[in-house]
């Protein structure tokens, strides 16, 4: 099983990749992150909140892409949320 820090790094790498792709290619990348973002064991409340924030921010990007709406302003929030999570588990 991957550690939370490995998972967070993998998610950040996928976000960076997805951001460079057109929406139709980015959406499957983001959809593939859902299972990774789920918590797999009890963490401190701060870590769980950071993980949840990253998950929600990624979902917002995915929803915008799915609806054909601009996501440019949503990518930075997803990355910041993931970076915060990484900082807590790294």
Image (tube, grey):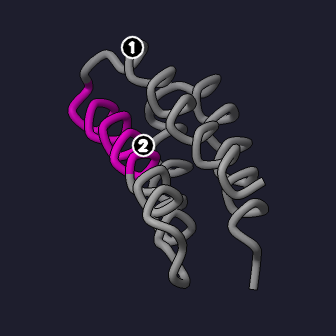
Q: Earlier in the sequence, mark 2 or mark 1?
A: 2
Q: Residues within 10 Å of mark 1 (few under 14, many from 20)?
A: few
- Which residue does the image show at 44% across and 26% down from the upper left? 77
- Quadrant location of residue 52? bottom left
Q: Which residues are magenta?
A: 53-68
Would you place residue 57 above or below residue 85 in this image? above
Check residue 26 for magenta coloring.
no
- For mark 1, give the secondary structure: loop
In the rendered image, which residue does mark 2 sit on? Answer: 58
Would you place residue 61 above or below residue 44 in this image? above
- Quadrant location of residue 8? bottom right
> Is 51 on the left-hand or right-hand side of 15?
left
Would you place residue 49 above or below residue 76 in this image? below
Give percent across and percent down for residue 56.
33, 47
Q: Which mark is residue 73?
A: 1
> Is 42 on the left-hand or right-hand side of 8?
left
Check residue 62 for magenta coloring.
yes
> Is 69 on the left-hand or right-hand side of 74?
left
């Amino acid at each position: 099983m991957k550690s939370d820090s490995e998972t967070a790094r993998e998610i950040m790498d996928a976000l960076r990749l997805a951001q460079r792709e057109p929406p139709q290619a980015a959406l499957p990348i983001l959809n593939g992150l859902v299972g990774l973002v789920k918590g797999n064991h009890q963490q401190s409340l701060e870590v769980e909140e950071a993980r949840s924030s990253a998950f929600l921010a990624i979902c917002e990007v995915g929803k915008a892409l799915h609806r054909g709406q601009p996501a440019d302003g949503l990518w930075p929030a997803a990355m910041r949320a993931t970076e915060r999570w990484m900082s807590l588990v790294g």
